[in-house]
Amino acid sequence: MFLSELGSAWHDARIEPEITHLDSASAGRSSNAVIEAITGHLWEESRHGSYVAMDAAEQMLERGSRELAALIGHHSDELVYRDTARAALRAMLGVANLPVASTVWVAKNEFGPNLVEFERRGFSVHTLPAASVYGHVDTDALENMLQFEQPDFIHVCHIGSASGIVQPVAEIVEIAHAADVPVVVDMAQAVGHVPTITGADIVYGTSRKWLTGPRGVGFVAIRADSRLRVEITDMEAGTTAGFIAGRLGLGAAVGELIGLGPQAVFDELAAIGRATRERLTGIGSWEVVEPVDEPSALVTLAPPPGFEAADVIAAANHLRDAGLLVTPALPERTPLMLDNAVLRLSPHLDAKREDLDRLASELRTMGYRS
Ligand SMILES: *Cc1c(COP(=O)(O)O)cnc(C)c1O
């Protein structure tokens, strides 16, 4: 039985998977319509020529951009596409009007590769205090800190790669803007998963995770009045039209999300996350890391005592052999918060009660190092 009322519609829109896919945080399963939007366009390119096919698809492309922009609280003319979220961040930082030694404040759940991008550019990175052991930004502390000092920008992962906590981005934005500090949001794990209209100056993300669009499409949106000045025309200069079929696939995926009702999807994913955490609490000395009712479907399990990263990887491999696809998330993904690997589960709307039962029984037998 599906955990979500939307589960059967979501399931019916896709082929039958050969594995219990609990890995949307790596890449969600695309629907048949998304795959057809991509392949259909590839055939059109071969039939008519790529640029002719692109012109013919113009209205669909515009619609896709309009709907994606609406989902993240931007206008479509503020969107720029790249291959990945990281490429979008790099492109943005490459033309942002930032001083040589910039200061950026980040949250505890910051994505390791983003820190590498900041360090590579010589930014001085400070970690914001957390309100609890879970790593949510302490917004009162932030407000106080901003009275004494203002970074060049605040960068927040709305949801990180190896933690299901959801940062209070709208509140962070409000506080930062009161001090005239720009906020840049990594929405790679948030878009299609939780509400993403936050008022942030700049947001970026990827098609392939919770939106279940294709791999190979990332995006960044820069508000026209962004406090961090980025000339969007500088970013578009030098890009060719890019992966048009992929953008059409992303547009189809966003269209399906809108068809299901974004808020209903977000509510159901939160309920699935909760059910997953409830079911797995106290199983075989694996420990659910997030608060049970954290409103996301990204769930991490800290390993039993004595497990090292290699053991967590072995556990994920064992689960895969048992037909359950999950990720062993190494601490490099979330270096400010994790010092050991965790198992990451990220079910989508087709999650079933039986899947969680099987996962629980497999985990129970893996409580000890082999
Ligand atoms: C996956 C992920 C990214 C990177 O996305 P790419 O499209 O692979 O560049 C960035 N931030 C977070 C939090 C992620 O989980």
Image (cartoon, helix red, strand yellow):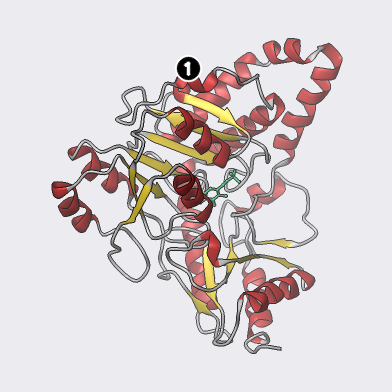
Ligand 1 is within 8 Å of the C-beta of the residue at disc 1: no
* Residue under the image location 56 percent in, 79 percent down: 303
Q: Residues within 10 Å of mark 1 (few under 14, many from 20)?
A: few
Question: Quick one: 103 or 343, which is closer to the camera?
Answer: 103
Task: Work out whether 310 lies above or below 137.
Answer: below
Residue 261 locus on image (x, y percent) = 50, 40
Asked which quadrant contains residue 82, the reply is top right
Question: Quick one: 276 or 202, which is closer to the camera?
Answer: 202
Residue type highlighted by circle 1: Thr
Task: Work out whether 294 lies above or below 363.
Answer: above
Task: Work out whether 88 lies above or below 161.
Answer: above
Direction from residue 279 to residue 315 in the image, left or right: right
Question: Quick one: 214 or 142, which is closer to the camera?
Answer: 142
- In the picture of the structure, the residue carrying the numbered disc 1 is 233
Direction from residue 261 to residue 172 in the image, left or right: left
* Residue under the image location 18 percent in, 40 percent down: 179
Q: Give the quarter of the figure containing the C terminus.
A: bottom right
| SS at badge 1 | helix
Residue 244 locus on image (x, y percent) = 68, 24
